[in-house]
Image (cartoon, helix red, strand yellow):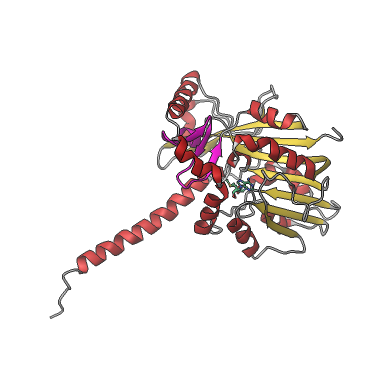
Amino acid sequence: MFKVPRNSFYILSLAYIIIINKYSTTNMLQVTEKEDISPSSSDNTKLKKDWSSVKDIRQESKTFGTRLLENKEDVWRHNAWDHVEWDEEQEEAAKQKVLLQSNNPMALKEQQKYLKDPSEFWNTFYKHNENKFFKDRQWLKIEFPELHDTTNVDSGNKKIFEIGCGAGNTMFPLLSINKNSNLFIYACDFAENAVQVVKNNNEYNSNYCKAFVWDLTNKHIPIEFIEPNSLDIVVLIFVMSALCPNDWNQAVDNVYKMLKPGGLVLFRDYGRYDMVQLRFKEGRMLSDNFYVRGDGTRVYFFTSDEIEKIWGSKFSIEQNAVDRRLIVNRHRKLQMYRIWLQGKFRKLPNL
Ligand SMILES: C[S@@+](CC[C@H](N)C(=O)[O-])C[C@H]1O[C@@H](n2cnc3c(N)ncnc32)[C@H](O)[C@@H]1O
């Protein structure tokens, strides 16, 4: 008679645990990414979103063409709501949460590891995730039509630089629709593995693009690839937040040097009290509003006033907007308050 080996139960249990872990990790990654930096992908209602969700902080009037939550009881009717204002109680709770975090920062000795070589952690991130983080972002066209305009057949010579490109989330969607034979897209990241991910993409074509390793906080611009005053557009999407606040000025100087007079910076990043900030546990804060994630990568949460200060001295601020969205997971009955900042900064002609 067939005899079941005594330890087969343990082997089967172990295999079950490994399989469950594998799938739950993959799921977790997807949820984190989705919740983290994809403002429109979370809005998976049947209705295709074709309006901008941002509101310039200098704009007084009510925004039209958006989905506003007028009555709190309607919250479960859609998966996302625009321009969700917080009441005093919610604002106060967020302040208290951040106060608790700043009263319990990361120990100074431990901080050194994350301040010394931040690219190491992003390198590991891309090694493990390869190009799982590639997203064909539909919102790029809505929020930054300037990018799509460069792809028209008659747009003439255009040079775009995607800094902190990761998997190339701006470069590849643009290349895929490009009809302009005079468009060239540069992409850089300080993590070598990210650049490798970009180069491994089937859509990578050295006639139209060039990816290379460069650190935005470097004291020198990468003149071997990019001449001073030569770029039409610099894209900074969820990159400035990864920098130490001490490095912001150097980053802005570098961008300024590479852009043409009249050239444009397109910026999008995390806003103060975004859900991701409020989720940080004690012991993760490096300095005010600057944290280390579990994987060692760093993230800062900006206010619109800071954006004005950082960019305003050298650039004309054409947009300084906030995107406050309530993302609803109707199935899990979750309400997630997201806050992203978005900006368009034009290089002033001779300073
Ligand atoms: C949150 S990811 C965003 C990636 C991509 N921009 C996107 O939106 O999908 C931040 C990226 O910035 C890169 N990065 C962080 N600090 C950088 C620096 N000082 N210079 C260049 N790249 C940097 C990281 O390696 C990472 O790929």
Magenta residue span: 276-300
- Pinpoint residue 11: horizontal percent, then vertical percent: 25, 66
Is 27 placed above or below 52 here? Answer: below
Screen quadrant of the N terminus? bottom left
| 349 on left or right of 53 | right
**Residue drawn at x 36%, y 56% as measured from the top left:** 21
**Is residue 43 visible to the viewer in this orientation of the structure?**
no
**Residue drawn at x 56%, y 30% as measured from the top left:** 272
Residue 293, magenta (yes or no): yes
Q: Residue furthest left?
A: 1
**Residue drawn at x 33%, y 61% as measured from the top left:** 18
Foreground residue among 215 and 38: 215
Residue 163, magenta (yes or no): no
Foreground residue among 166 and 248: 248
In the rendered image, which quarter is residue 175 located in? bottom right
| 163 on left or right of 124 | right
- Pinpoint residue 181: horizontal percent, then vertical percent: 82, 59
Screen quadrant of the C terminus? top right
- Pinpoint residue 58: horizontal percent, then vertical percent: 70, 24
Is 190 placed above or below 340 here? Answer: below
Q: How many marks?
A: 0
Foreground residue among 281 and 228: 228
